[in-house]
Image: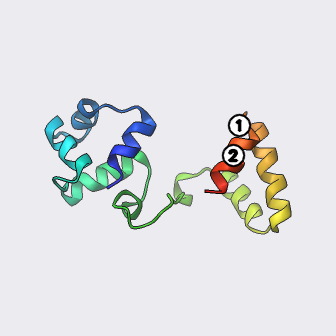
Amino acid sequence: MKLKELMQEKGIQQQQMAALLNVSRASIYKYQEGKAEPNIETLIKIADFFDVSLDYLCGRQNKNLIFADSLSDKKKELIGMIKDLNDDETLIAIGFVAKLANKPINEVMEKLNK
C-alpha cells in the first residue's frame, strides 16, 4: 500500500492520519509496514483524503490518475485540448505550464522521464 509514501508527500504524521481515520496510531504504523490491512471503508477514506484511486493506493497501478469529476470545467477543457496535441506540441505546452506554475522545467522533464 502507498500510504507511507502519500503521507510523506503531504507531511502527514501517523497521529494526524489516525485521528482523521478514527483508528489508532499503531494501526497506521501497521498499514504503512504491511503488517495489517485497513477495511474497505478505511481504504476509501484514505483514497478520498489523498485524492487517489483505490488501485493506486493498493499498488495496482504505477501512476496516480486524475479524475475529471474533481476538476473545474476550465481544467477539464484544458485537458481536452492537451489530448489533441502531438508530442512536439505537448512539450511546448509542458514548458508553458511549468513556467506558469513556477516549476523548474528541468525538474518537470525529469519527472516525465521516470
Number of residue marks = 2
What label sits on residue 103 in the rendered view? Answer: 1
Seen at 22% across and 33% down, the residue is 19
Spot occupied by residue 86 in the image (x, y as percentages of width and height)? 82, 68
Seen at 28% across and 36% down, the residue is 17
Q: Is residue 14 visible?
A: yes
Seen at 75% across and 61% down, the residue is 82
The answer to whether 45 appears left or right of 114 in the picture is left
User: In the image, what residue type sits under mark 2?
Assistant: Val
Of 33 and 81, nearer the camera is: 33
Mark 1 and mark 2 residues within 8 Å of each other at the beta carbon: yes
Seen at 71% across and 37% down, the residue is 103
- According to the picture, the residue beneath numbered tag 2 turns out to be 108
User: In the image, what residue type sits under mark 1?
Assistant: Lys
Spot occupied by residue 33 in the image (x, y as percentages of width and height)? 23, 48
**Image quarter in which the C terminus is found:** bottom right
Q: Secondary structure at mark 1?
A: loop
Q: Secondary structure at mark 2?
A: helix
